[in-house]
Image (cartoon, rainbow, N blue to C red):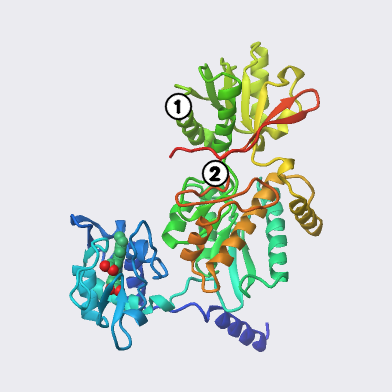
Amino acid sequence: MNRWQIVLLLALSVAQSAQALELNAQELAGKRLYREGLSATGGEVTAWVGAADMQVPASVTPCAGCHGADGQGRPEGGVRPPALSWQRLALGQGERQVNGRRYPAYTEASLARAIEQGRDPAGQRLDPAMPRFSMALSDRCNLIAYLKRLEADRDPGLQAQTLRLGTLLPQAGELAEAAQVVAAVLDGSIQQINEQGGIHGRQVQLVTLDPGPDRASAEQALQRLLGEEQVFALVMPMAPALDETLAARLEQAQVPLVGALGQAAYSRQIFEPLPGVREQLQSVAAYAETRLSVQQGPAQIVYSEAEQAATATALQADLRRRGWGEVPVLRFDGQAPDTLALFYLGSAQAFEQVVEALQAAGRAPYLFAASSQVAGAVARLPEQWSRRVFLAYPFIPSDWSARGREALTALRAREGLDGRQALLQVGAWCSMLLLEEGLKRAGRDASRDKLVAALEGLHDVDTGLTPPLGFGPGRRRGLDGAHVVILELPGPMFYPVAPYRRLELGP
Ligand code: HEC
């Protein structure tokens, strides 16, 4: 590299970070207190909450929880926390008005009084929904220093001309092939968005990192995406090593994610378009309850790999709530399960072994499974299983509109994809579509908080490839449930027997 290239590179990297606000140590400490309720010195920050003055750590109810990480205010259930812009609070002359109160400009001292005693500069009591906080003097100074910068402290990844998204896709290992499919769909979708002028005039960039072979490498890659790579949001990462920690990390960093591959537990930050195995099997259960009369049992839940254990137990609780009584959960150990109806979770390979064991024992229960897990095995099942196997499908060909089919076909042609991994393709496609729609609604002046709120407000989105998708408060799956399809042999032939209907799901 010659000298000029180095100068150019430096200039480029300066330009890249020019928009991200540099906070000094005091402001950073204030930001942590604002967002997480934590003191820089490790001291106690306490909040007195509500009219009854209940005492809790501020980390349970940090400022950002109500006023938003972006300080724009996050109205909820009749409570209206105002925007905390320094401009509005303190600068300039004259009275301000908020929630029916009028008061003169805040000073640092009166701001401290609002935070600690719940009174505004005119001495009026704030609504008790605003907690009273007690903190050390140094914490208060940090917090106020940050409140002065809050408005300018934009979320990373949003620049004048570009919007940066991030993902984790492995280049080696058993997920590499699937990751390539996801990469192709994401690239194709983004290219199309950019050709049409981007989102609010910004071109979308995708930063793809390899999560590597284990948890440590995956955490490092995630850290880099959220740190130096400055991505605004994540889309469809494939890093099962992060399953247990991802939600907490995203909540802490307040980074939204769309596309979690059907598995993650509920998190405010995570939006998944397609149903997980648990929701899918509940749709099959709902069908079986009315059409197969097997609810009175005996029924069993059988899973093959340890990773499925938690989902199996959750399904057991779902079935209990649905009136199935106590349905035992068993890990498949080679023995033929003895039951009338069998919910299966696990790999296609182990599914074949379960069927073989059943056959050897002369048993033929109804088998319930998610097509995404067992599709590879059903074509090879012996004929006697005809009309005994019921599969859940998040979407079926009749969900595809002409427009949806055309768009997917064009994308496949452009990216060199065929019809394999259709579920993954549609998952990545829907993730980008929902993210694009959310970003559009969040506006040019978007923040991560606004994106989460915009995604939450999406209802009945027509993807052209699935039943209409939507989210809501406390609802983070675009589809709750699946179509139910019966297997007929020889063939195999697949007949839909119950269309997708949104389930009422428990916790
Ligand atoms: C549980 C929700 C909640 C939390 C947490 C919260 N606030 Fe508030 N805050 C409110 C509500 C609601 C109001 C509006 C009260 C009113 O108008 O009477 C408010 C008002 C304020 C005001 C007065 C604004 C004005 O225009 O008069 C300030 C300043 C403020 N909050 C700062 C903070 C800071 C700093 C924190 C964190 C240390 C914080 N708040 C935490 C809900 C909250």
Type of amino acid under label 2? Gln
Q: Residue at x 36, y 82 (%)?
A: 87
Query: What numbered label is drawn on residue 263?
Result: 2
- In the image, residue 481 above or below residue 379: below
SS for dot 2: loop
How many angstroms separate mark 1 from mark 2 (CA)?
A: 21 Å
Give the quadrant of ligand 1: bottom left
Q: Position of residue 44 (x, y in %)?
A: 22, 62
Q: Position of residue 205 (x, y in %)?
A: 64, 69
Is residue 171 visible to the viewer in this orientation of the structure? no
Residue that badge 1 annotates: 320
SS for dot 1: helix
Camera-side residue of 180 and 452: 452
148 to the left or right of 132? right
Type of amino acid under label 1? Arg
Nearer mark to the viewer, of 1 and 2 = 1
Camera-side residue of 130 and 375: 130
